[in-house]
Structures are given as C-alpha cells and as structure tokens.
Image (cartoon, rainbow, N blue to C red):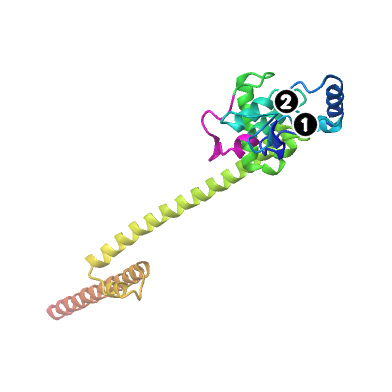
Amino acid sequence: MATINGVHPYADKFPMLPDAELDDLAESIRTNGLRNPVVVTTDGLILDGRNRYAACQKVGLDPETVEYEGDDLAEYVIDCNVTRRNMSTGARAMATALVLAADGRREDGKWRRGSVLGADVTESRNNWKDAVRQAGVVLDWAPEVADQVADGTLALNAAYDVATKRRDAVDAEHRAKAIEAQRKREATIREKEENDRKLAVLTADASPFLLQVEDQTMTIAVAYAAHLEATRKEREAQKEREMGWRDGCRSITESVYKLKG
C-alpha cells in the first residue's frame, strides 16, 4: 500500500464535499468500511479519493491505496470528478477547465484539439462542450473568479458575462487602434503622393526653391507654396508689363493720329 504524501494539484481543482456530506461519508465508512481505495501517483499524491481520505481520517482509518498506472493524469482526474452530483454543470466545467489549463491544453484562447473530453452525464455533449468553452473564456479574461465558479459560489454564466465584457472592451480598443493605424498609413501614402506631385512641379518648372528642398532648409510643401506665390507674383508683374506696353502703344497711336489731323 502506497504512502499518501499529499494531494496532486489537478485533484485540488475540484472542491471538497461540504462538511455535512463529508460527515455522512465518514459515518458510512465507519459502518461499511472503505469500498473504493484512494488512487495515488507513484510519489504518493492523491489523484482520486481526497474526500474518502478525509473521511477515513475522521474515523481513524488508514485507507487502502492503489497507484495510478495510466499516462494521462489530467484526463483521469477529470473522469473521476466530472460526474459529481454535488456540483453544478458550471462548477464541473470550470474545475475541468482548470485541470486542462494546468496541463497546458489551452493556447491562444482555444482548447487544444481533443482536450474537451466526453459529455457530462447530466448534459448533452454540445451543452457540456459549450460550458467548458465558457470556462476557458473566464480563465482567459477573468481568472480571479475561476475558483469561485469551481466551488459553486459564483455561477458560470455570471463569470462568463464579466469575462466577455472585458474581452469585448479589449477587442474594441484593438479595433480602434487598428483603424487609427490604418488611417495614419493612408494619410502617409496620400502625403507622399502629394509631395511627389509637388516635387514634380518644382522640378518641371526648374524652381529655385528646389535647391532649398534638396538641402533640407525647406519642406516640399513650404517650397511648393513659395513657388506658387513667386509664380503668381511673376504673372502679375508680367501682366502689368504687358498692360504698360499696350498703354504705351495706344498713346503713340493717338499721338500719330493727332499729328495727321
């Protein structure tokens, strides 16, 4: 018979029986003896039978033990506890999720394929899988309440509601950041396209401001604006020169007509 050296962490994910039920179990063991041995690992950690062990201690009995010979501790612990009638489906699902997560079977917000084991006897397979799925979301987004769900002091639905609100808030923030990042990328592209267009104008017009762009004393936008202003002033000056020339011609013509007259 193996020595009991403690409780395996996986088994500890499921809550103990209430005191009254543990007392009833102890009395049953006193009267009828221990019907099922306590199952332990090779190093003496209880995998199944914590309540039986505690009840035996109450009546001063050394329980019979057997060593677990399988190779999947998590699955064994879940199989031993998932049908417990004193726990709600939500509590069983959360305890199951805690064991699976501790065994490294949850990655990137998903259960590893094949991790969500068979249906709970009181629920359809789909309902059970959905309960474990919700429990996984709670572990991801509201892990501080997971133990309350497992021990039955908080309903899984209530914990899932808290978790999904947190998740949705973070998702909304991420979407907003993504939209803002996309807006900035598009603005950068538009700015580059506009600068390329302005630079092409400066180059085509052989603008003197192009040199100031090249030596980085002016931005393209400032150089382009200065070029437009200089071009406008030159056009106005040219227009004034043309008007002066026309006025001069008109004056000469009028003088000639006067002389002929």
Residue 175 appears left or right of 119: left
Query: Would you name the residue on which mark 2 appears?
Result: 37
Few, some or many residues within 10 Å of mark 2 (<14, 14–19, 20+): some
Q: Is residue 99 magenta?
A: yes
Picture quadrant of residue 172: top right
Amino acid on which disc 2 is placed: Pro
Relative height, residue 76 to residue 175 (above, below): above
Magenta residues (range)? 98-117
Q: CA distance from mark 2 to mark 1?
A: 9 Å
Relative height, residue 5 to residue 196 (above, below): above
Query: Would you name the residue on which mark 1 appears?
Result: 53
Quadrant of the drawing holding the N terminus: top right
Relative height, residue 177 to residue 161 (above, below): below
Where does the image place residue 23, in percent across and percent down from the top left?
87, 28
Picture quadrant of residue 118: top right
Where does the image place residue 190, in percent across and percent down from the top left?
38, 55
Few, some or many residues within 10 Å of mark 1 (<14, 14–19, 20+): many
Along the line of sight, the residue nearer the viewer: 176 or 54: 54
Picture quadrant of residue 101: top right
